[in-house]
Amino acid sequence: MTEFSTPPLVAADPQANATDLLVKRVEATPDLVLFSLPTADGGWSPVTTREFYDQVIALAKGLVAAGIQPGDKIGLMCKTRYEWTLIDFATWFAGAVLVPVYETSSPTQVRWNLSDSGAMAVIVETPDHFARFDEVHPDLPGIRNVWQIDLGDLDKLAASGTDVADEEIERRRNLAVGSDIATLIYTSGSTGKPKGCVLTHSNFVELSRNSALALEEVVLDPNGASTLLFITLAHVFARFISVLSVHAGVRVGHQPDTKQLLPSLGSFKPTFLLAVPRVFEKVYNVSEQKAEAGGKGKIFHKAAHTAVEYSKALEAGSVPLGLKLRFKLFDTLVFSKLRAAMGGNVRYAVSGSAPLGPRLGHFYHALGITILEGYGLTETTAPATVNLAKKSKIGTVGPALPGVGVRVADDGEVQVKGVNVFKEYWNNPEATAGTFDGEWFKTGDIGAFDADGFLTITGRKKEIIVTAGGKNVAPAALEDPIRANPVVGQVVVVGDQKPFIAALVTLDSEMLPVWLNNAGEDAGMSLDEAAKHPAVLAEVQRAIDAANETVSRAESIRKFTVLPIEWTEASGHLTPKLSIKRNVILEDFSAEVEGMYTGAPATEGHSIVS
């Protein structure tokens, strides 16, 4: 059993709740621009701390006037936008509890979250969201109020609460203490029915106060820290960052449409980003394919290789003169354009939810963008460990945050205790008891520490594949590098109790036409045609061979099948944060899996690694 704990940097305040973070921010910097709202002409309109606070109070009064009582649950189905955080804080000021619902949730998922939580009201954003809720409304007799943001209902709510006294809001906001429920967030359900995680006010308050100091260079930039959120706020990762930003005085903008992300980055000019590895892979792949299309593919590849080499030399503490000169040339030709595409001011990026991989970590580091990989779950209010500006190792998820302890059990399972660990699963004492060992939360992830306490996650405990020959294989170690290839959408490694390891692969429909065009092939071919095309199969084979080079022969992928479809959240194969639902995929594509062990269809490849 290996354990590393980091003492808290801030003394705990058991009486504090999340509303105190905004109250203290107003006291400290009432005129600071805390949010920027997108305008029709592509610009940004400022919202000061005082203006945000006043809007929070007005909306909280509206909720009170509508009959919301302290402790009531309010469902929220809304994409990432300013109003999400406005509603979040207004709910706390009214003494209530927010229950996020993913904006992509099906009617069945909406019904489960709202019924299991006992929600009394729901706020939806669009007519589409309302339609999905309305389909199951008859099964939710407890829902008394339904408000729709796009119909202007928030303004109407605020206007209806003018007779509610300031003293009543002050009384309500002070009802909760640190150990009380702040929010009920349902897990993404990748392994069954979603469980409601009870996160407390202390989880948000203590983690925000400690993280702000630990990530001082990122969120307390003396020149003004800013970030553009595009990950869904229904997920704990972005939700925590939004609360941390209020506490730390970070200027926040929102852009839920990833197709508009680059123009928004260009105009907003954030100093740090929050993203999942797939975003960093996409930025790299798009840049690579653009270079290929312009006849500059060789230059880009040389530049990328130089960047990784340069970053590794920096990490080692000495950069040879020749490498410095080479890097300076590519910095002018290639890297400066990439930095400009992200707004020109990004110095840090916080990455979570899946491993990024050392190659991309070094690539962005050379660009002057330090990607701080972190690790956590809904049950740990997002981060448990994170690389820090002055304490970072590429390829790891960093040391334990202040106020957090992490240990690796004898079987390799990562366990967490501290200010960030949730209270319990809602109405599920059996699941709660099964996931705790005393005060330690059992994450279900497999990991290891280095001598300095930096954690590396190698896979999920339940996902470890044991071949017929008894070899233990962590699928993520193979899947992550394969998924980085521009033509690959998703990949699932299989082989439990089988004679060798194999893989199911889907193609990236967005990148595929670009790649096909650059490869001199028909860019208009369908997914079905591409899944059988020799050039595409050869490219997938290259990605698999590269991944195989990192493992032993017993762990290597011997066969693969390219499926003529995409796995999406809508198809039921991905969670809202785009993690694969491995058990669902294995069930739905069991015939294709068995086919790799009994025959050799046209879409199947064979690894050539000896």
Image: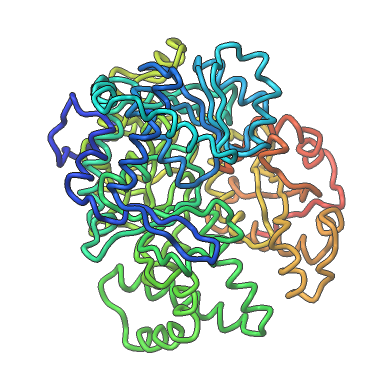
Percent position of residue 28, x then y: 17, 48
Give the quadrant of the C terminus.
Answer: bottom right
> Does residue 68 sit above or below 586 in this rendering?
above
For the N terminus, give its image quadrant: top left
* Count of residue discs: 0
Q: Residue furthest front?
A: 163
The residue shown at (58%, 56%) is 258
Q: Is residue 470 visible?
A: no
Indicate left or right for 283 with 410 as reference: right
User: Based on the displayed image, in which of its 4 quarters is residue 104 positioned?
Assistant: top right
Q: Observer-nearest residue: 64 or 4?
A: 64
How was the colour assigned to the protein in this rendering?
rainbow
The percent coordinates of residue 485 (x first, y second) are 62, 61
Q: Position of residue 78 (x, y in %)?
A: 55, 38
Residue drawn at (64%, 72%) of the image: 289
Residue at (81% x, 55% y) in the render: 527
Rendered residue at 55%/51% (across/down) = 256
Q: Position of residue 297 (x, y in %)?
A: 62, 80
* 248 vs 234: above or below: below
Residues 283 and 318: in front is 283
Q: Is residue 347 above or below residue 2?
A: below
Describe residue 37's horizontal placement relative to residue 405 as left or right: right
Q: Nearer the viewer, residue 558 or 53?
A: 53
Q: Do we see residue 190 in this rendering?
A: yes
Q: Is residue 308 left or right of residue 78?
A: left
